[in-house]
Amino acid sequence: MERYPMTVNTPVLITEDELDTLEEFLFSPAVSEEALDLIGAHGLLCAVNISPSDVPEKEWLTLLFDGEPKWESSQQKEEMLGLLRKLYHTIGNDLYSDQEILLPCELSLETDDEDELPEITLWAQAFMEGVFLREDQWFADDEETVAGLLLPIMVASDLFEDEDIIEVRRDRSLSEEMCNQIPEVLIDLYLNYHAPEK
């Protein structure tokens, strides 16, 4: 996948109807039960776009699908991969343009069902999976700054046993405030790695 800046050849941005089509496929029996849903795919592709070093498409597709889907046809494969590329480019376009990313979920850890993970947690877990793909590079130059920027996402992900993060999660007001910061944090992370190229 090419990085930005955008060119006239860049694919058009993904539409709501196309997102619905992609979401339906990601919930279908064609993909592994461990595959990411649309919320998770968005989180992963945010991280892949921000990553300080390129993540080849094949690598993030394997992670997203948890293997290879059972395609009905080559046409279906082409369509779904095309939609994922559109989603990737749409996120990249927003990041490059300094536009606030619209997450496909509520920016809240509150849920109606205590047994269900909040959608923002699913998004954040997938984002962190994207970070882990190139973890050394993410933290190579300025570990303290990056860790600070990632903190709201790390808090939302509920993947970390660090006492400071656990303490933040216990503070409902503070953890909700951090979740609301995530769209802004994404821009800051992108600029941290890619501003010199602009």
Image: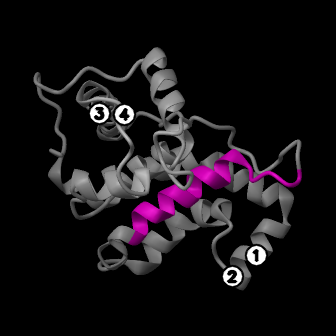
Residues shaded magenta: 114-132
**Are discs 3 and 1 less than 8 Å apart at CB?**
no
- Please give the name of the residue rendered at 26% of the width and 20% of the height, measured from the top-left corner: 12
Q: Is 73 drawn above or below residue 59 in the view shown?
A: above
- Please give the name of the residue rendered at 84% of the width and 65% of the height, measured from the top-left corner: 171
Relative depth, front residue between 69 and 174: 69
Determine whether the residue tagged by mark 2 lies in a helix, strand or loop. loop
- Whether residue 50 is visible: no
User: On residue 166, which mark appears?
Assistant: 1
User: On residue 87, which mark appears?
Assistant: 4
Sequence-wise first label, 3 or 1: 3
Sequence-wise first label, 1 or 2: 2
Amino acid, disc 2: Glu
Amino acid, disc 3: Lys
**Are discs 1 and 2 less than 8 Å apart at CB?**
yes
Question: Nearer the viewer's eye, disc 1 or disc 2?
Answer: 2
Crowd band around label 3 with a 10 angstrom C-alpha radius: few (<14), some (14–19), many (20+): some
What residue is disc 2 on? Answer: 161
Q: CA distance from mark 1 to mark 2?
A: 7 Å
- Where residue 169 appears, as percent x and y from the top left, is 78, 67
Amino acid, disc 4: Leu
Question: Nearer the viewer's eye, disc 4 or disc 3?
Answer: 3
Left or right: residue 161 compared with residue 130 = right
What residue is disc 3 on? Answer: 77
Crowd band around label 4 with a 10 angstrom C-alpha radius: few (<14), some (14–19), many (20+): many
**Magenta span contains residue 127:** yes
